Image: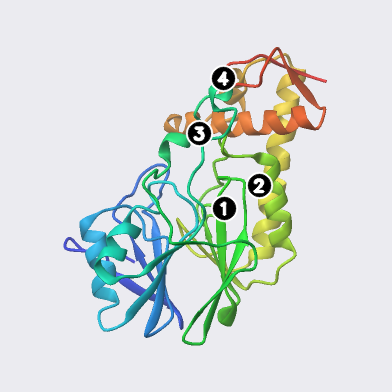
Amino acid sequence: MHQSSTQPDVERVAPLVRRIVAPNPGPFTFKGTCAYIVGEGDVAIVDPGPANPRHIAAMLEAIRGERLRHVLVTHTHRDHSPAARALKEATGAIITGCAPYSPPEDIGVTGPGLDASHDTGYAPDEILAEGDRLDLAGVTVEALETPGHTTNHLCFALREEKALFTGDHVMGWATTVIAPPDGSMREYMESIERMRERDDDIYWPGHGDPVRDPQRYLRALVHHRRAREAAILQRLEAGDETIAAIVARIYEGVDRRLHGAAAMTVFAHMEDLIARGLAESDGPATLTARYVRR
C-alpha cells in the first residue's frame, strides 16, 4: 500500500474492513496509525488516528454515502484518538470505546512514562467494558478489555470475520512498549494470556501489517517477553544495578532513538519482578533506582 501526495489511500483488506494509514510515520508508529472502517452502509471507524486534516478528509471521503455511527477508540494515545472529535463534528457519530485517561496515583513517584502522550481532550459519549457489543446493520463488534500498554486499552472483535482490532496491544511490526506508571507488564501478560484463549483468525493492529496466525504470534510474544525477563535477571546477577546499564547491554544494536522506550519496558519488567519477589530496589521503583536480584 502506498500513500499518495494528496491524501492517504483506502484499501479494502477484508469483506467488512477497509484500512487507511494516517500520514504519521515514525520510530514509534512505523508507517503510520491504521484506521479501520468496519461494516457497510452503517459503519464504525476504529482508531481514527491523529487530528491530521488530510487524514480526516480521507476517512470522510471513504464513507461518503454511508452513515458513520460509531468512532471506536482502543486507547487514548495521541496517535490513535484525536481525530474522533472531528469525525463526530462532521457526521454526528458517537465516540465509543475506552475510558478517558486518568493519571495513576503513583505518577509523582515513578515519573510520567508515556503518560504525556495521552489525548487529554478525549471525551467519549459511551464507554465500553468487557463483553459490550455494538450492532451495525448485522455486523457485531464486541469489546475486550486488554490493559497493559495503557490501563484503558480495549480491543474490538468483529465476530462475523473472527477478527480482532488490537490497537497497540499487539502490533504487526514490533513489540509493544510498556511504560509505567500507566503501563503494566503484569496486566499486559495477563491480557495476552486471555487472548490466547480466543479463536480469532486475524488481528488488525494499530500499526503494521495484519497478524494472520494469532496463536503462533502470541506464543512468540510470550517467549520474547520471558526471554527479555531472563536477560534482565542475568544482568542483575552480573552486577548491573541500573536500568540504563541493563538497556545498554541487552538492547545493544537497537536504534538508539528507541532506547528511551526500551528503558521504560525494562522498568515495567522491574516492577513485575519486584512484585513477584525476584528483584528489589533501593527505594521506590523508578527509572533511576538501583536494583538487585533477590
Give the quarter of the image for residue 54.
bottom left
Which residue type carries mark 4? Ala
Q: Are marks 3 and 1 in contact (CB under 8 Å)?
A: no
Q: Are marks 1 and 4 in contact (CB under 8 Å)?
A: no
Asked whether disc 1 touches disc 2, contact meaning CB atoms under 8 Å apart, the reply is yes
Front in this rendered view, residue 283 or 220 = 283
Which SS class for mark 3? Answer: helix
Residue 49 placement: quadrant: bottom left
Q: Is residue 240 above or below residue 58?
A: above
Q: CA distance from mark 4 to mark 2?
A: 23 Å
Quarter of the image where the C terminus is located:
top right
Q: CA distance from mark 1 to mark 4?
A: 25 Å
What residue is disc 4 on? 244
Residue drawn at 69 percent across, 30 percent down: 271
> On the image, numbered disc 2 is attached to which residue?
188
Q: Which residue is mark 3?
A: 261
Looking at the image, residue 144 lies above or below residue 113 = below
Locate residue 184 relative to residue 179 in the image: left or right.
Answer: right
**Mark 3 neighbour density, 10 Å: few (under 14) some (14–19) many (20 or more):** some
Cα separation, mark 4 vs mark 3, equals: 11 Å
Compare marks 4 and 2 and give the one earlier in the sequence. Answer: 2
Side of 57 where 226 appears, left or right: right
How far is disc 1 from disc 2 in space, using C-alphas? 8 Å
Return the x and y of residue 223 as percentages of the image width and height.
72, 47
3D distance between C-alphas at marks 3 and 1: 15 Å
